[in-house]
Image: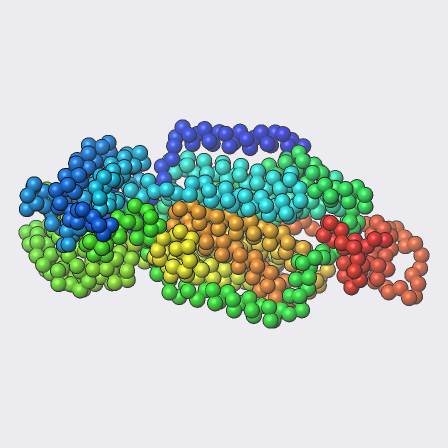
Amino acid sequence: MTALARWCLRRRLLVVLLWGALLAGVGTAAGLTGSAYSNDYAVPGTEAGRAQELISEGFPGRVGDSDTVVWRTGGDGGAVHDRVRDPEVRERMTRALDDIGTLPGVRAVSSPYGGGDGRTDQAERISRDGRTAYATVTFDAPVEDLDEGEVRAVVETAQRAGGDVPGLDVELGGAGIALTQEKGGHLSEAVGVAVATVVLLLAFGSLAAMLLPLITALVSVGTATLGIGLLSQAMTVADFAPMLGTLIGLGVGIDYALFIVTRHRQGLKEGLPVAEAAHRAVGSAGRAVVFAGVTVCIALLGMLVLRLSFLNGVAIAASLTVVLAVLASVTLLPALLGVIGMRALSRRERQWLAREGPDLPPELRAEATPVGMAARWSAFVSRHPRLLGGFAAAAMVLLAVPVTGLQLGTSDQGNDPAKATTRQAYDMLADGFGPGANGPLTLVGEIDGAAAKLAFQELPDRLRGVEGVARVSGGELNGSGTTGVITVVPDSAPQAERTSRLVERLRTDVLPPATESSGLQVRVGGLTAAYDDFAAVILGKLPLFVGVVVALGCALLLIAFRSIGIPLKAALMNVLAVAAASGVVVAVFQWGWGSGLLGLGGPGPIEPFLPVIMVSVLFGLSMDYQVFLVSRMYEEWRLTGDNRRAVRVGLAETGRVINSAAVIMIAVFGAFVLSGDRIIAMFGIGLAAAVALDAFVLRTLLVPALMHLLGGANWWLPRWLDRGLPRISIEPEPVPGPVPESLPGPLPAAVPERVVVGAVGTVPAARAETLMGLSEKAPTVAPHGYRHDQD
């Protein structure tokens, strides 16, 4: 790492130009090829997936995306028209639907209106009270291939129809229509970066130093985002992957650079030249950054064990972002440190350094203990480990309680913000036709022979008497008579547990006896069925996934810290962080606590893949803080062999930078609530809560408390295992300070035997205690953050 830092410093202009060329090159390629993101989260091999395949094969005309235009009359209480069959309403909506049918990209429009006298109307598309009706708009392409401009033209044409008719409300719903919904754009990223800027400026007091983490993070995230677009041309990448990559990349990119810049500034305060301070920063903090980045990537790539195509793309895309963030931190950042020179320190710090010199000689720097809030807190934890550790554990368990009520499913447009046209169309359909109209079940039959055909034709009558069924239509046969479709409308909403029970009842109790003697094969598909199948697959593979991620993370920590206790505690802390953060997500999104105030729509189930991605990301990010905290403790342990001092010094020296990094991550993640995307908002709140709990409860309370209680057992490793493990050093080996050839004379009897020898000569223990910040006297505190005696 030091050799890499030297090369980047000597050729800093070349390094900056290479990164600029990489960004420009990837951007040009992405602009020429475009992107091909997918919002198809189907899981191959499930019953609902097979049902969709049969429909695609038997009814090719249904391949395109289908959306709905919903209109309602009498909505304002004083409406002139109170029925959808009123002549003016009928004429206006018929004309609008005809216009929609001529628009580019539209294959067909199914209107509820038939003949002019109304006797040939499609009654199932007009509510019983006559106030609500809907039409189906079928596009030429599936939703992932739709042109947003063509969809927007449909929305504008439909909504114009209700503009001049009093009491007529026209709204649109469906997956294609959702493409036109306003998102937060880049507001979330801008807010996160703005907060990070303020935190960095307060932490460094230097404009130049503040800009470095922002520049490296933005360059790496920009390159990664464009690269993910190119990646989507080669493999399936979910449409939320770029936003998720940006969320992770900004957080880790700024934090990694923050750790290196902080160590570089410490070197400058010790009187080191700029180049030497940068070499040491990259050689020490840079190693921890690389190690932390590897752990994040391992956790993210753990998603590959699930063998779900769209999650494979998410894993690789997010890992690409982390890899580029690490590379920028250990190459671009040292080059920029060489460019700004001493301006990495604030003007006040540079003036102090010029006037007073280094705060402590480098030989005493390893023995110095920082002062301030972090040091006082570290001492407080060391005095009350049982009380504080118990409080922290109880708080984490309490926050994890909502996870016991976790309901996995996919939120639909009933969870959209109340003012969205998709949400209003959803509510109109639910009010006019019942809650199940927004998510009908599709029963698809494979018909082979006369007996199977007869059984299929009799099936609708059997289904009408099933508990939980509101309406049944069909069955419709394709041209060859080999595939049939029956539509079942539940009497409950798509997200309701009652609807999931209906799916299970149809599959296990209703369809087998009705089809077993005829050879008819019927598969249950539709919105709720697909969501339930997806959740079942995820839950089935989740234990394997978590086991792989935990095992790999523990193996890395075992090799790095030569200890069994450190990896085990890290695994426990990570599980607590994931459970507590998931509890917060359940409370906000499933129970609806505060979701309305945040503009996140109504309560609903948690996305099935959210636990997987949260486990991946949180295990990686938690390892970051574990590495940065414990590596400093480990360094002190190797120097002194004193566990109590190692824990106190490690927490005191890393507390401030970890807290600053955590505030930045919380701001970046929390700002993604403004994205307008429910899935990304879930990630944002979940990750922000996890980082807050990890940094301010686990790493500053529970971890040091446990390490104080365990004492030297923290660092225990069987000899046979120590001999067999490869050796990887996160921090460089400590180098002892030089010892003078001779002491200046015999020590007086009154002077304690313990002395510190360094560049300043032989220092009595009392003086050494003052220099090292261990004396109870109140010395002057320099702006460097270390005790500095005025003598």
Residue 676 left/right relative to 210: left
Q: Residue at x 49, y 62 (%)?
A: 576
Q: Residue at x 69, y 38 (%)?
A: 343
Residue 480 left/right relative to 70: left
Residue 744 left/right relative to 564: right
306 w.r.t. 721: above or below: above
Looking at the picture, the colour scheme in use is rainbow
| Res. 456 in view | yes
| Res. 566 in view | no
Looking at the rendering, in which quadrant would you find the N terminus?
Answer: top right
Give whichever of 745, 729 is nearer the camera: 745
Residue 456 left/right relative to 560: left
37 w.r.t. 461: above or below: above
Q: Which quadrant of the figure has residue 352?
A: top right
Residue 118 percent location from the top left of the image: 8, 45
236 w.r.t. 600: above or below: above
Give whichever of 275, 295 is nearer the camera: 275
The total of numbered circles placed on residues is 0
Residue 651 percent location from the top left of the image: 65, 58
Q: Which quadrant of the figure has residue 64?
A: top left
Residue 22 percent location from the top left of the image: 52, 31
Give whichever of 721, 176 is nearer the camera: 176
Q: Which quadrant of the figure has residue 767?
A: bottom right
Give whichever of 740, 455 is nearer the camera: 455
Q: Residue at x 81, y 46 (%)?
A: 356
Residue 708 percent location from the top left of the image: 64, 67
Q: Residue at x 53, y 43 (%)?
A: 193
